[in-house]
Amino acid sequence: DYLRAGDDLTTDFWEIFIVDPQHHPVGTCMLSWVLRTRRDVPMADIMKREQTLIPVDMDQEEVALRFQKYALISAAVIDQAGRLVGMITVDDIVHIIQEEASEDVLLMSGAGDEGDINQPVLDSYRARVRWLIVNLVTALLPATIISLFGGAIEKMVALAALMPIVAGVGGNAGTQTLAVTVRALATNQLTQSNRWRAVGREIRVALLNGVSIAAIIGLAVAIWFANPVLGGVIAAAMLTNIVMAGLAGALVPLVLERAGADPAVASSIFVTMTTDSMGFLLFLGIAVASGLVG
């Protein structure tokens, strides 16, 4: 009867939050329970005392994770004194998840956390240019490595044609691992107890991928250039770089998180620097060490 007569109640709700005289939540009751229970039965007899309470200052991403973990439809929101101040429903969480996912994608691309096409030009410029500058600085390392092997490249032009393949495939492998790791961190799947097991898993996956890709590229290069040694060199470099890419894609986000930085913001820049640098260094270094070029 109170629910029917309460004009000040919210329009949509699925459960009732029962409070004590101090307005502290003491239990919840689904609407279906109320409808199926006789009028003379007290709410205290049918309510569920265990409930998930949401502090009013909790980050919205953490709220979404809590809804996912406990399969909640709605939850009570409390202030610092533990008093009920409102509620949040699964409809609200859907919007939060969409916002957080869009923000993570934009941060990983270095486009800032807004990414609105109506954002002022100067704001977009400031959000993006700082990461482009960082990227420019990190790109100097691969360029330096290439310059060290300038003489070898001059003697065998095929090295210049093939070395972007090693770096590019390694970069893609690192991005795959990076995406999995960042998502696992965002959803709290990675904890102190299982993170090294997850790193080991990613290395094993990278090793299997490396063996497969190295066999394909090694055979193709040996046949195309009629040079088995060159095929062996690129196969060894490819295998090692993909494994290094898997290691970097798993470790860089963990290191950034430990340092207090957002792994979604800067991980891709450092992973790309690692795969490019190691790709060029491994391929050109093995080519020189093997005697392929004098």
Image (cartoon, rainbow, N blue to C red):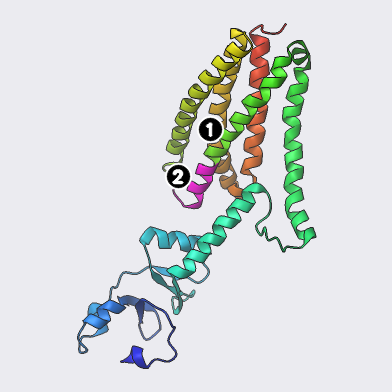
Quarter of the figure that contains the N terminus: bottom left
User: Is residue 9 at all visible to an observer of this figure?
Assistant: yes
Q: Which residue range is magenta in the image?
A: 179-191
Give the camera-side residue of 13 and 258: 13
The vertical placement of 172 against 61, above or below, is above
Earlier in the chain: of badge 2 and badge 1, it is 2
Quarter of the figure that contains the C terminus: top right
Q: Name the dominant secondary structure of the magenta segment.
A: helix
Residue at the spot of label 2: 192
Count neighbours of disc 1 (C-alpha within 10 A) and say few if under 14, some if 14 to 19, many if 20 or more.
Answer: many
Quarter holding residue 159: top right
Q: Which mark is residue 246?
A: 1
Q: Which mark is residue 287?
A: none
Name the amino acid, label 2.
Gln
**Which percent across, then down, holds residue 87?**
44, 75
Q: Taking 46 as reference, is 78 left or right?
A: right
Instruction: State yes or no: residue 283 in magenta.
Output: no
Q: Residue at x 53, y 69 (%)?
A: 57
The vertical placement of 92 against 240, above or below, is below
**Which percent across, then down, holds residue 100?**
55, 58
Quarter holding residue 172: top right
Name the amino acid, label 1.
Gly
Q: Nearer the viewer, mark 2 or mark 1?
A: 1
Give the camera-side residue of 5 and 270: 5
Q: Taking 220 as reference, is 30 left or right?
A: left
